[in-house]
Amino acid sequence: MNKNPLMLIILLTSPAWGDVYKCPQPEGPPKFQQMPCTITGEGEKISVDAPKPSSEGGLREGEKAYLQSQGEYRKKQEEDAQMEHKRQEAIAVEKRKAEAAESQARATWYMGSMMGLRPR
């Protein structure tokens, strides 16, 4: 739920693209800004239109190939990470089994020595 409806209204009603003013400077290149250069509105008004959407997303073939290779690389990294996680879990299970077997062997030895079945 939006906590600030005024901000939502402003964002929905304000244009994404608008006018730009080219303001000459005494020294150096002209300055571009969204408001008139002076209070009297001096400066050249330049209209800026939104770029037209491309049916292909505006990407060149090389860029598409790069993005695809990056996606494949990330997918491979994720699969490798999942396999490593499973491997680590399996190692932990085997370690717990070994510790349990060792504990059982010690208990068996201890009980055997207590009953006189094993030499001390």
Image (cartoon, grey):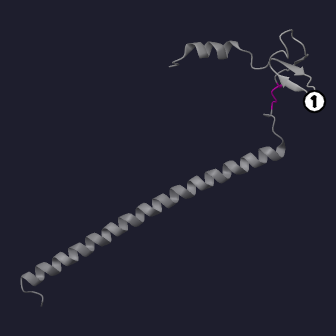
Q: Which residues are magenta?
A: 51-55
Residue 18 position in % (x across, y down): 80, 17
Give the vertical position of 50 relative to 108 (above or below).
above
Residue 117, quarter of picture? bottom left
20 or 119, nearer to the observer? 20
Give the vertical position of 66 relative to 50 (above or below).
below
103 or 45, nearer to the observer? 45
Residue 50 painted magenta: no
Q: Which residue corresponds to mark 1? A: 27
Q: Dominant secondary structure of the magenta stretch? A: loop
Residue 46 position in % (x across, y down): 89, 18
Residue 52 painted magenta: yes
Residue type of the residue flagged with mark 1: Glu
Quarter occupied by the C terminus: bottom left
> Which residue is located at x 11 percent, y 78 percent?
111
> Which residue is located at x 80 percent, y 45 percent?
63
Residue 64 position in % (x across, y down): 78, 44
> Which residue is located at x 36 percent, y 64 percent?
93
> Which residue is located at x 82 percent, y 30 percent?
54
- Quick one: SS at disc 1? loop
Give the vertical position of 59 relative to 107 (above or below).
above
Give the vertical position of 97 relative to 2 (above or below).
below
Q: Residue furthest bottom?
A: 119
* Relative side of 24 to 74, left or right: right
